[in-house]
C-alpha cells in the first residue's frame, strides 16, 4: 500500500485507557503540542466516576478527547478519527465514538483472556464483537515495546511499564505529524529538579514510539493539520476553564484593589479552582479550605463584611448546602461571588459528568424573596472574563452573583490569546463616602440603582450592624409590613438594574427570520458548530447565546420578537426555557434538551433544527 | 488613641431580653471590657466586631455600638473566621448560645478551635433553647424535662470545656452571669490570648429554665460548690476556705485541709499557662456532687494561630515570587506567540 500524507482540516483523537494508564496526561500533552504548533483546538477529559475503579473494568475507563483543526475549533468533536484504547475495557467503552473511517490503535499486550473477560467480551475477537472490524486497526504490543525500549535504562519494571503512555503518545505524534519538542520540554521541566534520571528514558520511549509507528505497515497514512490561519496576534496559551476562572477572580482583585478571599470545600468538578487560587499567594490571594460547604460561603461572607473581594466555589450539592447563607448575602447586601461548576444531579448524581441542571436551583433555591444575579461562562477561556464580570457586578452593585460553569468547561481546555489587563474596565466598589457617616451611617440607604454603600470594620464612624433579619434603610430591625414589602421590592429592583451594566444580547446571523437558536453556558461551541453546519446546508438560521441570565439583557424581547421560532437548547429538561416563559411569556419556546451527563453532539442540534426548518 | 468608656459601646437599640435574663450581665461585662481592650491593643472601636448566630444571646450585636453581624444559626464561628483572615487587625467577638455553638454550629466551633483562629468566643450556656420557647439543648442535663422531652431527655449533654480541650483548644475559661467582675476579667484575658479563646458563661433563663445553674451558683451554696481557679494559686475553696483539690493517682479528689493530715502544701497549684491538657480537662469536667464547678481561666497556652501563619506564608511566597501582576501571570509558564 502506498503511504500517503493527507492534509486534514481537522481531526478528533480520543485517548482511552484504565485510570492508571495515564491517558489524561497523554491527551493533554498531545493537545498542548498542537496548541504550540498553532492549531485551533478543544479538549474534553471524560473522567471515570472512581479514582481507581477495579483495574481493567469498564467503570475504570478514563478518556480524553481532543479536536485539533486548521481553524478556530469550538467543540471537542462528536466522533473521533482515531481511538486509542490501552485495554479491552477502554475499547468497549469507546468503540461507539469511532467514525467508520477511524483508526483504532490498541495495546495488544493488554488484550489477554482475563482482561477481555473483565471487560465483558464473550468472544476472542473484540473488534467483531463491537462491530468495528472494518476500521483501520493498529494492533501494537505497546507494553512489550516499551519494555524493550527501556530495558537498559536502569529503571525498574514498574517504572518502565508506566512509560507505555509516552510510547503511545510517540505513535500518535507520528501519525498526526506532531513535532516532539513540546513533550521534550515538558519532560525536562517536570523531572529536572527531582528526578533527572527520568528525562532520558521518557525522551527515548517517546522517540521509539514515534519511530515504531513510522516503521510498521499497519499505519497506512499519516496526516498533517496545518496551523490555524488569521489567528489573533499575541501571546497564546492553552487553558482550562477552572484555571481561567481562578485567574479571572485574581484579575478582578487586582483591578478593584481589594484582596481576594476564597472560602471553599473540595468538590468535583470545582476543586481545581480552589487549588489554582491556593498557588497564587504571590498575588495576595487568601484561600481557606473550610470544614464544610457552609463554612466555605460563611467565611467568604465574613471576608466580604471585612472588605475583601470574597468568593466561594462549589458544585451543585454544595449550592444546596450554601443556600441559607446565600440568603444571608442577599439580605445583608454584601458583594459575594458564588461559583457553581455544575455536574450531573440531583444529589450526588454523576460528579464527573457535565450538566446544566443547577440553573433553577441558583435562580429560585432559597427561602423567601431572594433575588441575586446569575451569569454563565460559555467556553473554558471565557471563564476568565465572566469571573471578572461576576466580581465587578458584585462589588459595584452590592449583590451576590452566581457564576455558572460546567464540568465540561472547567476540565476542558482551549487555546487562548491572553488579554492585557489594560483592556479590562476599572472596577469601582461601592464604598461609603465620608459624608455618609455624618449623623450615623445608614447601611441600607440606596442610590438611584438601589445599591447600598459598603463600609467595613476599620472605617471610623461607620459602625453598623447587619444580619439576616429584615431591617429598614437605617439598619434598624423592622417587622413593619410596609417596610418589608418595600425592602423586598428594592432588593429585586437592584438586581434588575444590573441589566443597565451588561452587554446587549447579540445575534449571530440575520436579525430576523424563521428560526433563532438560543443557548446559554457551555453549549456555546456545539451550537456554533451546529449553526455553521446548518448554514453549509444552505439554510438560514440565527443564533443568540446568553452569558447573562438574571437579569436578562435589556434587548432580549426585542431580539426574540423578530423570529418565527425560538429553539432553546440546554443540558437539562428545560430550565432556561421555563425561566424565559416566566420572564417573557409573550413568546413561544421550542426546546432541545439532553440529560445524559454528556455535552450535545453537533448532530443532536442539527437534527433538532432540521425538524423545524 | 481614643479613650473610651462603657457608654461608648452602648447602642441606641432597646435591649429586648426578658427581665432577669442572665444575658444582661454578660453584655454589661463586655461593654465594660471593650474600652480596656481598645486601650491595651492600641486600637479604635471601629476595629472591634461582634458576630453572632441565632438565638436569644445572638441579639447582642445590636446592643453594642461597634461593627456587628447577626448572622444565621450556627455559622458565627465560620463568619468570624473569614473576617479574621480577611483583616487580622480586627478584634473579633463571637456571641453564641449553647444551641448555636454546640448543636447546629458544632462543626464550625471545633474547627475554629482546631485552627486556633484568633477570635473570642463568648458561649452563653443556659442549657435550653429560649428563643424557640423551651426545647432541650446539647447541654441540657440527662433527664431534663422540656417541651420536646416531656418525659425527660435520654441523651447525655456536652460539657463545652471538654469539647474545647478535645479539640486541643488553647484557651478555656468559665464564669457565671452573676459574677460580673469575673466575667469581665476573663474577657480581658481572652482578648490578650493570641488564639481561639472560648469563654463559657453559665447564664440563667428565667422563663424556660429558671435556676439553670442554681445548684451551684445560688448564693447559699456557691462557695462550697464552685472554685475560682487563679494562676499560681492553690486550688482552695469552700465557705470555710478549707477544701482543696489534690491529685490522687490519676484522678482529682476533694480533700479537707486539716483532716487526715492534709496540709495546704498538698493542694494543687493552678497553672493555666502550662500545657497540661489532661489535668485541665479534668478541671473543666468537675461537677457536683463530688466536685466544685471550676470557674476562671482553666487553660491559656500559646500556640500558632491560623491567621498569623496565613500572613507569614503570604509574605514568604511574595518574597520569592517571580510573578507580580496578572499580566505577568497570564504570560507565565507554557505560552507561544503568534506574530
Image (cartoon, grey):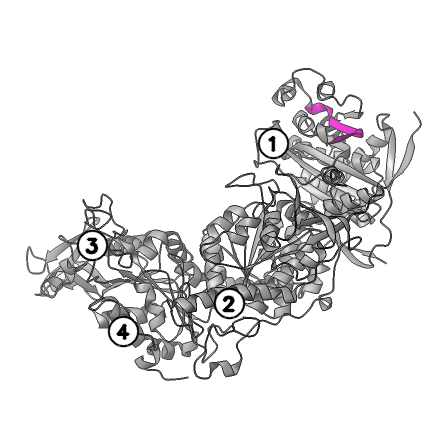
Cα separation, mark 1 vs mark 4, equals 63 Å
Q: Which residue is mark 4?
A: B28
Residue A490 - label: 2
Query: Are labels 2 and 4 on one chain?
Result: no
Q: Nearer the viewer, mark 3 or mark 1?
A: 1
- Compared with A303, A7 (above or below) is above
Query: Are labels 2 and 1 on one chain?
Result: yes
- Residue occupying image coordinates x 20% and y 61%: B207
Q: Nearer the viewer, mark 2 or mark 4?
A: 2
Q: Residues within 10 Å of mark 1 (few under 14, many from 20)?
A: many
> Contact (CB < 8 A) between labels 3 and 1?
no
What main secondary structure does the magenta stretch of the protein show?
strand
Query: Are labels 3 and 4 on one chain?
Result: yes
Query: Are labels 1 and 4 on one chain?
Result: no
- Compared with B265, A112 (above or below) is above
Image: magenta residue range: A98-110
> Contact (CB < 8 A) between labels 2 and 1?
no
Q: Which residue is mark 3?
A: B286
Q: Quadrant of the N terminus of chain B?
A: bottom left
Q: Is residue A470 left or right of residue A151?
A: left
Amino acid at each position: 500500500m502506498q503511504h500517503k500524507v493527507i492534509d486534514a482540516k481537522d481531526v478528533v483523537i480520543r485517548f482511552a485507557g484504565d485510570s492508571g494508564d495515564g491517558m489524561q496526561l497523554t491527551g493533554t500533552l498531545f493537545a498542548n503540542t498542537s496548541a504550540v504548533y498553532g492549531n485551533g483546538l478543544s479538549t474534553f477529559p471524560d473522567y471515570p466516576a472512581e479514582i481507581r475503579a477495579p483495574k481493567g473494568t469498564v467503570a475504570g475507563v478514563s478518556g480524553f478527547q481532543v479536536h485539533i483543526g486548521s481553524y478556530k475549533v469550538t467543540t471537542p468533536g462528536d466522533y473521533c478519527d482515531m481511538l486509542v484504547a490501552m485495554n479491552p475495557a477502554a475499547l468497549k467503552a469507546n468503540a461507539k465514538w469511532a467514525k467508520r473511517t477511524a483508526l483504532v490503535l490498541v495495546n495488544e499486550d493488554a488484550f489477554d483472556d482475563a482482561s477481555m473477560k473483565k471487560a465483558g467480551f464473550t468472544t476472542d475477537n473484540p473488534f467483531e464483537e463491537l462491530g468495528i472490524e472494518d476500521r483501520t486497526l493498529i494492533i501494537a504490543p505497546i507494553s512489550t515495546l516499551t519494555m524493550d525500549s527501556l530495558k537498559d535504562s536502569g529503571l525498574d519494571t514498574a517504572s518502565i511499564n508506566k512509560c507505555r503512555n509516552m510510547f503511545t503518545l510517540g505513535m500518535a505524534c507520528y501519525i498526526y505529524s506532531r513535532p516532539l519538542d513540546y513533550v521534550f520540554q515538558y519532560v525536562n521541566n517536570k523531572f529536572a529538579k527531582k528526578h533527572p534520571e527520568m528525562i532520558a528514558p521518557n525522551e527515548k520511549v517517546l522517540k521509539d514510539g514515534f519511530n515504531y509507528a513510522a516503521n510498521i505497515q499497519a499505519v497506512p497514512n499519516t496526516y498533517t493539520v496545518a496551523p490555524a490561519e488569521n489567528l489573533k496576534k499575541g501571546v497564546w496559551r492553552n487553558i482550562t476553564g477552572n484555571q481561567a476562572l481562578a485567574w479571572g477572580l485574581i484579575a478582578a482583585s487586582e483591578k478593584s484593589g481589594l484582596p481576594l478571599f476564597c472560602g471553599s470545600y473540595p468538590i468535583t468538578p470545582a476543586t481545581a479552582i480552589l487549588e489554582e487560587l491556593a498557588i497564587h499567594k504571590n498575588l495576595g490571594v487568601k484561600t481557606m479550605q473550610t470544614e464544610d460547604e457552609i463554612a466555605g460561603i460563611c467565611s467568604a461572607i465574613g471576608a466580604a463584611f471585612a472588605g475583601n473581594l470574597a468568593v466561594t466555589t462549589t458544585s451543585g450539592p454544595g449550592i444546596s448546602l450554601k443556600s441559607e447563607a446565600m440568603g444571608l448575602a442577599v439580605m445583608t447586601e454584601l458583594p459575594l461571588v458564588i461559583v457553581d461548576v455544575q455536574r450531573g444531579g440531583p444529589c450526588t448524581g454523576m460528579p464527573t459528568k457535565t450538566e446544566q441542571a443547577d440553573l433553577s436551583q441558583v435562580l429560585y433555591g432559597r427561602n423567601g424573596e431572594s433575588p441575586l444575579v446569575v451569569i454563565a461562562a460559555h467556553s473554558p477561556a471565557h471563564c476568565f472574563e465572566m469571573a471578572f464580570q461576576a466580581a465587578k457586578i458584585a462589588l459595584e452593585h452590592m449583590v451576590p452573583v452566581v457564576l455558572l460553569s460546567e464540568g465540561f468547561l472547567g476540565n476542558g481546555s482551549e487555546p487562548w490569546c491572553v488579554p492585557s489587563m489594560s483592556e479590562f474596565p476599572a472596577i469601582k466598589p461601592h464604598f461609603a463616602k465620608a459624608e455618609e457617616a455624618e449623623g450615623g451611617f445608614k447601611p441600607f440607604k440606596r442610590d438611584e440603582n438601589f445599591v447600598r454603600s459598603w463600609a467595613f470594620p476599620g472605617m471610623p464612624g461607620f459602625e453598623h450592624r447587619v444580619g439576616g433579619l429584615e431591617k429598614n434603610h437605617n439598619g434598624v430591625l423592622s417587622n413593619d409590613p410596609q417596610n418589608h414589602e418595600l425592602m423586598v421590592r428594592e432588593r429585586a429592583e437592584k438586581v434588575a438594574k444590573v441589566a443597565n451594566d451588561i452587554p446587549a444580547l447579540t445575534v449571530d446571523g440575520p436579525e430576523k427570520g424563521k428560526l433563532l437558536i438560543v443557548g446559554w453556558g457551555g453549549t456555546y461551541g456545539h451550537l456554533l458548530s451546529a449553526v455553521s453546519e446548518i448554514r453549509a446546508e444552505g439554510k438560514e438560521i440565527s443564533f443568540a447565546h446568553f452569558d447573562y441570565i438574571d437579569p436578562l439583557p435589556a434587548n432580549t424581547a426585542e431580539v426574540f420578537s423578530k423570529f418565527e421560532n425560538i429553539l432553546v437548547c440546554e443540558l437539562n429538561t428545560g430550565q432556561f426555557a421555563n425561566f424565559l416563559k416566566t420572564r417573557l411569556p409573550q413568546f413561544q419556546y421550542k426546546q432541545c434538551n439532553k440529560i445524559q451527563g454528556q455535552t450535545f453532539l453537533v448532530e443532536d442540534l442539527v437534527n433538532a433544527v432540521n425538524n423545524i426548518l | 488613641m481614643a479613650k473610651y468608656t462603657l457608654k461608648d459601646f452602648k447602642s441606641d437599640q432597646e435591649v429586648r431580653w426578658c427581665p432577669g435574663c442572665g444575658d444582661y450581665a454578660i453584655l454589661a461585662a463586655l461593654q465594660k471590657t471593650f474600652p480596656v481592650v481598645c486601650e491595651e491593643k492600641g486600637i479604635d472601636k471601629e476595629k472591634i466586631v461582634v458576630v453572632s448566630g441565632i438565638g436569644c444571646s445572638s441579639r447582642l450585636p445590636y446592643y453594642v455600638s461597634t461593627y456587628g453581624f447577626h448572622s444565621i444559626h450556627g455559622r458565627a464561628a465560620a463568619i468570624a473566621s473569614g473576617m479574621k483572615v480577611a483583616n487580622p487587625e480586627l478584634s473579633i467577638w463571637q456571641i453564641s448560645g449553647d444551641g448555636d455553638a454546640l448543636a447546629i454550629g458544632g462543626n464550625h466551633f471545633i474547627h475554629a478551635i482546631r485552627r486556633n483562629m484568633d477570635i473570642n468566643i463568648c458561649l452563653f450556656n443556659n442549657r435550653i433553647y429560649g428563643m424557640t420557647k423551651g426545647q432541650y439543648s446539647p447541654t441540657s442535663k440527662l433527664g431534663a424535662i422540656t417541651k420536646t422531652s416531656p418525659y425527660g431527655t435520654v441523651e447525655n449533654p456536652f460539657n463545652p470545656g471538654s469539647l474545647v480541650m478535645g479539640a486541643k483548644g488553647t484557651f478555656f475559661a468559665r464564669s457565671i452571669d452573676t459574677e460580673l467582675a469575673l466575667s469581665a476579667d476573663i474577657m480581658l484575658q481572652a482578648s490578650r490570648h493570641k488564639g481561639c479563646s472560648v469563654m463559657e458563661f453559665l447564664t440563667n433563663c428565667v422563663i424556660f429554665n429558671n435556676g439553670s445553674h442554681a445548684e451551684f451558683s445560688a448564693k447559699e451554696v456557691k462557695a462550697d460548690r464552685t472554685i475560682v481557679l487563679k494562676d499560681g494559686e492553690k486550688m482552695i475553696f469552700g465557705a470555710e476556705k478549707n477544701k482543696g483539690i489534690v491529685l490522687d493517682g490519676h484522678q482529682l479528689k476533694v480533700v479537707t485541709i486539716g483532716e487526715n493530715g492534709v496540709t495546704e502544701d498538698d493542694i494543687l497549684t493552678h497553672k493555666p499557662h502550662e500545657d497540661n491538657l489532661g489535668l485541665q480537662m479534668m478541671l473543666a469536667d468537675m461537677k457536683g456532687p463530688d466536685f466544685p464547678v471550676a470557674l476562671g481561666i482553666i487553660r491559656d497556652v500559646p500556640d500558632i494561630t491560623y491567621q498569623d501563619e496565613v500572613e507569614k506564608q503570604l509574605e514568604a511566597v511574595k518574597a520569592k515570587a517571580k510573578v507580580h501582576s496578572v499580566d505577568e501571570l497570564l504570560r507565565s509558564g507554557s505560552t507561544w506567540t503568534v506574530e
